[in-house]
Image (spheres, rainbow, N blue to C red):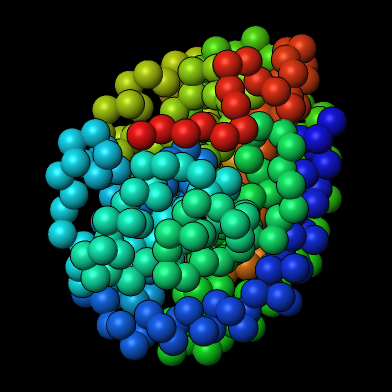
Amino acid sequence: MHLEQEIFQQKDVLVSLINEQMARVAKIAEAIKAFNPTFVCLAARGTSDNAALYAKYLLGAYTGLPMMLAAPSLHTLYQMPPNLAHGLVIGISQSGRAEDVRQVLEDARKQGALTLAITNYEDSPMAQTAQYHLSLLAGEEVSIAATKTYTAQLTIIAMLIAELTPHKELKGELSLLPDAMAQTLENTHSINQWAERYRYATNLAVIGRGFNYCTAFEISLKVKELCYMSTHGYSEADFRHGPIATIQQGFPVMLVAPKGVTLPYQLDLLNVLKERGAECLVISNDDEALAGGHYGMRIPDVPEWLSPILAVVHGQVFAMKQALYRGYPVDKPRGLNKVTVTK
């Protein structure tokens, strides 16, 4: 089963990235500082779009630059690209073959923007289009559902942040990641003891906020891809604005609630959900949050900005276990291809 192997390769991928790519990341960070962009534009599709959400929060928080997500259809279908001349434009793709994302990079480069591609392949079209490229060093990912390449994308983004900001402590915090990933993977073994309970569930809400907004979306996507369930990722704030009305007795809700500035709001929502009869599955490193859920999935204590790299792993394993209990193929979900080329 390739999916399980790739999930458990994530520690080794992080070690490779931190040991082998830091010098290249530092060189690109210097080029970004020299260019002095006035904004950052992020282009991606699918799982990589969730990595772009992580970048949107991190780059916005630590560089102070305005952030935007690209609208690739403006570059391809409408052929009316916006002016990105003074920006840093980052394209993210596992395969590097996302044609609409590549077109964003090409248009931006022609306009005078600084362009960076983040892919798993040095010879990919996106890598060849952008001025700079960062490889994920994840090795071949056989399973259609992306796992190790997603956490590699987040890690590369975190490494770039550590080089772009004057906060020197971030590099030291990055060094904690491989061991923290190993602990996280060990902690996923408990999921097997209770995941079967939800084999007949048809709905799932996944809720995060801030740095873990991306985690809610990525876990939701993994459950959709592998289990064919109707799942939705939400910000805790957005969830209170209407979707909370869907909660009824027994409704499963997964909360991504690590320690940090968003935790008090997630704890409050956890209490509200329990009052409404929801079954709460909690991913956290906070004892109160873990104790408050029907089932808890513990991650190690790391700074909040790094927690998405670990928290998503429990969602990956949960989705895989659900698919197995339902009798679905985990490496080749129906109707999906490893590389989806959209224009």
What residue is rendered at 37% in x and 66% in y? 115
What residue is rendered at 76% in x and 68% in y? 15
User: Height in image: 72 above or below 249?
Assistant: below
User: Height in image: 176 above or below 271?
Assistant: below
Q: Is residue 269 left or right of residue 119?
A: left
| Residue 65 on image: x %, y % | 27, 72
What residue is rendered at 32% in x and 21% in y? 245
| 100 or 1: nearer the viewer | 100
Q: Report which quarter residue 232 is drawn in.
A: top left
| 120 or 181: nearer the viewer | 120
Query: In this view of the protein, can residue 58 be seen by the observer?
Result: no
Query: In this view of the protein, can residue 149 be seen by the observer?
Result: yes
| 207 or 179: nearer the viewer | 179
| Residue 4 on image: x %, y % | 80, 37
- Number of numbered discs visible in the structure rendering: 0
What residue is rendered at 69% in x and 61% in y? 137
User: Height in image: 90 above or below 65?
Assistant: above
| 217 or 332: nearer the viewer | 332
Q: Is residue 48 left or right of residue 102?
A: right
Viewport quadrant of the C terminus: top left
| Residue 185 on image: x %, y % | 78, 50
User: Height in image: 85 above or below 291?
Assistant: below
Q: Report which quarter residue 75 is drawn in.
A: top left
Viewport quadrant of the N terminus: top right
| Residue 21 on image: x %, y % | 65, 74
Q: Is residue 25 left or right of residue 41?
A: right
Q: Report which quarter residue 321 is drawn in.
A: top right
